[in-house]
Image (cartoon, rainbow, N blue to C red):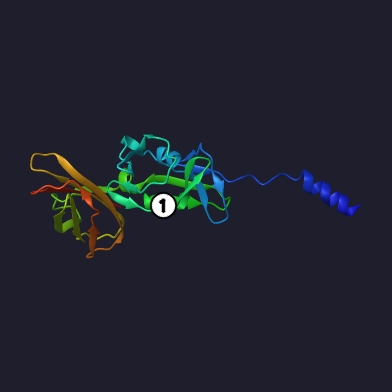
Amino acid sequence: MMNKLMALLALTAPLAAEPQLFVRNQPFAGPVRWFPARTLAPLDGLLESLGCSWQVDQGKLQVSCQGQGGAPQGGPALKEILPISLEGRTVRLEQHIQQDRIFVDVDQVATALQCSYRKGADGNVDLYGPLLSQGLGQGALRGNSDDPSFPVHLEKVQLTPMGGVMRGYAQLKHRGQEPFKWVLVRVAVYEKSGRQVARCTELIKDLQPGADAFVQFPKLVGECQNPVMRVEFEAR
C-alpha cells in the first residue's frame, strides 16, 4: 500500500521548472539546450538579442556590436561553422551544428564579447550587453588621449604596417587617485584625409593608481603610410 502511495505522489508531483535564459533583461526567444556544465543557444539569435550585426565576408563571420543604444541589428541565418571576428579581434567559440543551426556556449559568448554573465541559484542565466562595444554605462568617466586632465594617459603607441594590415600596441598609465574596475579603450586609425581605415576596442580590468597597462592591437585591416590615431577611454 505504501509503495502504491509513493508512486501516486511521484506521478502527481509538479515537474521542476526548466531554467530560463535572459538576454539584456528579456527572455531569450530562441531554443536553448540545457546541460549540467553548459548552456547552448543559437549564435545568430544571441548576437541579435545583444544588439549586434553580422555578415559573412571572405569566408569569415564579421561581427559588429556598435548599434545605437544596443538596439537589435541582425544578419543572415548562421548554418555553417566559420572563423569569427569582432571589430577586428579574432573570437574563439566552440561551434556546434544542431538542427541546421550554429549553437554556441553562452558563457563562451559572454567571455568573447566581454558581457556581464550571471547564473542564479534557480538555474536561470542572465546575459547582458557587451562592454567592448556598448560601453560601461551611465556614470562612467569618459575622455580621450587629447585630454590631459583624464586620469588614464596614453604614454606610447606604435603601429607597424605589415603587408596590407597593421599591428601595434598602446601603453597606458593610470595617473589618477582612485582605482578603476574597468577601463575601455577604443582606438580608431585614420588617413590624413580623414578616412577611417581601422578600429578596435579592448578592455582592461582592475587598473590601479600609478599602474601601467598595455593594449595589444589585433591585426587592423587597412594599411596607410601616415596613420592618424584617435584613442577614447571609458573608466569606472
User: Please, is residue 156 above or below residue 78 in the view?
Assistant: below
Residue placed at 78% from the left, 45% from the top? 11
Using a 10 Å C-alpha cutoff, classify the residue at mark 1 as few (fewer than 14 neighbours), some (14 to 19) or many (20 or more).
some
Residue 76, horizontal then vertical, whole percent: 39, 35
- Displayed quadrant of residue 180: bottom left
Which residue matches tag 1? 93
Q: Nearer the viewer, residue 225 or 215?
A: 225
Q: Is residue 110 visible?
A: yes
User: Please, is residue 104 above or below residue 76 in the view?
Assistant: below
Residue 101, horizontal then vertical, whole percent: 48, 41
Please indicate whether residue 148 sits to the left or right of residue 91 in the image: left
Residue 33, horizontal then vertical, whole percent: 55, 46
Task: Tell me how many marks there are.
Answer: 1
Q: Nearer the viewer, residue 92 or 192?
A: 92
Residue placed at 37% from the left, 38% from the top? 51
- Displayed quadrant of residue 218: bottom left
Residue 176, horizontal then vertical, whole percent: 21, 59
